[in-house]
Image (cartoon, coloured by chain):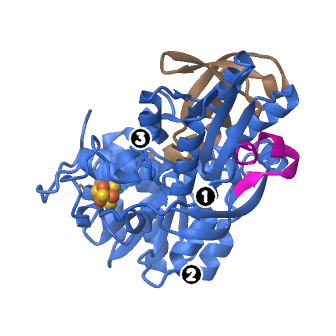
């Protein structure tokens, strides 16, 4: 029910509460409302729940966590 | 798909499982609040790659499951009213009320429609001006912005034929209720990532402090969940009662400001009944008086509790995390997804449905990774 999935903005149209985007979810394109993510632009990844974007994915933070996970993988490889 | 695949990588899953095993020196019981996480844990067999000291118990985080009978019965009554188009998320259609379910109303000729978004229900109201269109606005904080936008849009456009049957609940008060129960087993929480995406993490500090336990915000992919378990185990081992955010790519401490502002414009905090937990103060949202014209309960009468017939279903205990689905005598026997006796078997996010789908109760070892 709280399912939300990331997708990439292809184009945007409208403004304020009617601002919306065509969003690519791994090949499936859907229309998404952008009222709550005024900062999101073409090329950004947004998190979408029931047709509405609830967050713009923070790429820096994602990269930071993935780097930490990569060093965990290295650690595991060394100790095995 | 970026922001999905990297969180399903088998290598990372394995090294996280390893790190959790190394961090664990004693038994710990961790509850994941969100039904979406319960589903992912079962689907990927994550509980089975954890050290045996770590027990994951499943929380009340399935909005379909916690919606009380009174609202299911009200939905059935409204949906059966001539002239009404009743719109709902698909999961609600098979939830049994005291007089059948919405699917039954539809089979008897009621105009019950499954919508993907509350905004689709608004669109149905626009294109059917002579019909009453009612949307079943259930959900946690995650869904509150969309439900608020439906009400806001209807008001702005003066859509007099649209209303919402609101059973909207808030997670932090339910966590407090679970922790206050004398039989609670919870020692650490995995908080619901998308609830926090909307609302932020500020509400959890006082809970962690008061009940002296760690609360870790996590996402929904296997790597997210295991990273959350690792952070939670490390905090438990060190005796910390912090709020940790392991889902920073979407969760900020203040949440989504624009979404919170609209929720606040449309809804006010109120007491709500939760299946399994009873009536909890300040645990839900109701339409503000400025939106009373869009309240289905004002239009069709208030939801009232009709005493249901006795049932073998222990979904209340399951939603509180005090019983496992395997402890229910009906599980897999008289209760299956095709013939569900209770909500936790109906909803794909309910613990009973997740166990039924992904776990063979006769198989002690189980499957480590289940692929579709
Ligand atoms: S298995 Fe069915 S009857 Fe038993 S608790 Fe779950 S939903 Fe209720």
Instruction: Give the vertical position of A6 relative to B306 (above or below).
Output: above
Q: Which residue is mark 3?
A: B94
Which disc is residue B212 wearing? 2
Residue at horizontal 63 percent and vertical 51 percent from the top: B167
Q: Report x, y in % for residue B86.
A: 59, 32
Instruction: Give the vertical position of A48 relative to B129 (above or below).
Output: below
Instruction: Give the vertical position of A57 relative to B253 (above or below).
Output: above
Residue at horizontal 52 percent and vertical 77 percent from the top: B179
Q: Is residue B263 left or right of residue B107?
A: right
Q: Nearer the viewer, mark 3 or mark 1?
A: 1
The answer to whether residue B238 shows anywhere in this view is yes
**Mark 2 or mark 1, earlier in chain:** 2
Determine the image quadrant of residue B165: top right
- Measured in 3D between alpha carbons, the distance from the residue under mark 3 to the one under mark 1, in whole angstroms, is 20 Å
Determine the image quadrant of residue B132: top right
Q: Identify the subunit bearing mark 2.
A: B
The quadrant of the rendered image in which ligand 1 is seen is bottom left
Q: Quadrant of the C terminus of chain B?
A: top left
Chain identifier matching the blue colour in the rendered picture = B
For the record, the magenta segment spans: B285-299
**Local secondary structure at mark 2:** loop
Q: Is mark 3 within 8 Å of ligand 1?
A: no
**Local secondary structure at mark 3:** helix
Determine the image quadrant of residue A11: top right
The answer to whether residue A74 shows anywhere in this view is no
Q: Report x, y in % for residue B214.
A: 53, 72
Query: Disc 3 vs disc 1: Cβ atoms closer than 8 Å?
Result: no
Crowd class of label 3 (few under 14; some 14 to 19; many from 20; radius 10 Å): many
């Amino acid at each position: 029910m709280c399912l939300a999935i990331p997708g990439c903005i292809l184009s945007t149209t409208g403004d304020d509460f009617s601002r919306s985007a065509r969003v690519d979810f791994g090949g499936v394109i859907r229309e998404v409302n952008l009222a709550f993510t005024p900062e999101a632009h073409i090329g950004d990844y947004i998190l979408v729940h029931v047709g509405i974007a609830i967050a713009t994915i923070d790429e820096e933070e994602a990269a930071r966590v993935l780097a930490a996970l990569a060093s965990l993988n290295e650690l595991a490889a060394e100790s095995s | 798909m970026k922001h999905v695949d990297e969180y399903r990588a088998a290598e990372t899953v394995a090294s996280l499982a390893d790190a959790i095993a190394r961090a664990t020196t004693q038994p710990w019981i961790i509850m994941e609040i969100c039904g979406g996480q319960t589903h992912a844990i079962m689907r990927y067999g994550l509980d089975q790659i954890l050290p045996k000291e770590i027990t994951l118990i499943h929380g009340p985080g399935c909005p379909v499951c916690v919606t009380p009978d009174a609202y299911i019965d009200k939905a059935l009554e409204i949906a059966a009213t001539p002239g009404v188009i009743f719109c709902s998320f698909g999961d609600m259609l098979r939830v049994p009320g005291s007089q059948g379910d919405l699917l039954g109303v539809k089979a008897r000729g009621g105009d019950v429609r499954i919508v993907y978004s509350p905004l689709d229900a608004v669109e149905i109201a626009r294109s059917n001006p002579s019909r009453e269109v009612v949307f079943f606005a259930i959900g946690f904080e995650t869904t509150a912005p969309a439900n608020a936008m439906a009400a806001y849009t209807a008001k702005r456009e003066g859509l007099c034929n649209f209303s919402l049957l609101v059973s909207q609940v808030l997670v932090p008060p339910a966590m407090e209720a679970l922790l206050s129960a004398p039989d609670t087993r919870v020692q650490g929480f995995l908080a619901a990532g998308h609830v926090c995406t909307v609302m932020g993490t500020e509400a959890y500090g006082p809970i962690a402090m008061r009940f002296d336990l760690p609360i870790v915000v996590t996402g929904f992919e296997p790597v997210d969940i295991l990273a959350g378990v690792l952070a939670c185990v490390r905090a438990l081992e060190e005796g910390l009662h912090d709020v940790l955010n392991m889902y920073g790519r979407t969760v900020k401490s203040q949440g989504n400001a624009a979404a919170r502002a609209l929720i606040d414009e449309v809804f006010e905090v109120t007491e709500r009944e939760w299946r399994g937990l009873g009536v909890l103060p300040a645990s839900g949202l109701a339409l503000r008086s400025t939106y009373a014209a869009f309240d289905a309960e004002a239009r069709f009468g208030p939801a009232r509790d009709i005493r249901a017939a006795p049932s073998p279903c222990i979904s209340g205990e399951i939603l509180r995390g005090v019983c496992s689905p395997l402890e229910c005598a009906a599980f897999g026997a008289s209760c299956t997804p095709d013939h569900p006796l209770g909500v936790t078997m109906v909803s794909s996010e309910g613990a009973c449905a997740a166990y039924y789908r992904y776990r063979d109760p006769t198989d002690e070892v189980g499957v480590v990774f289940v692929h579709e």
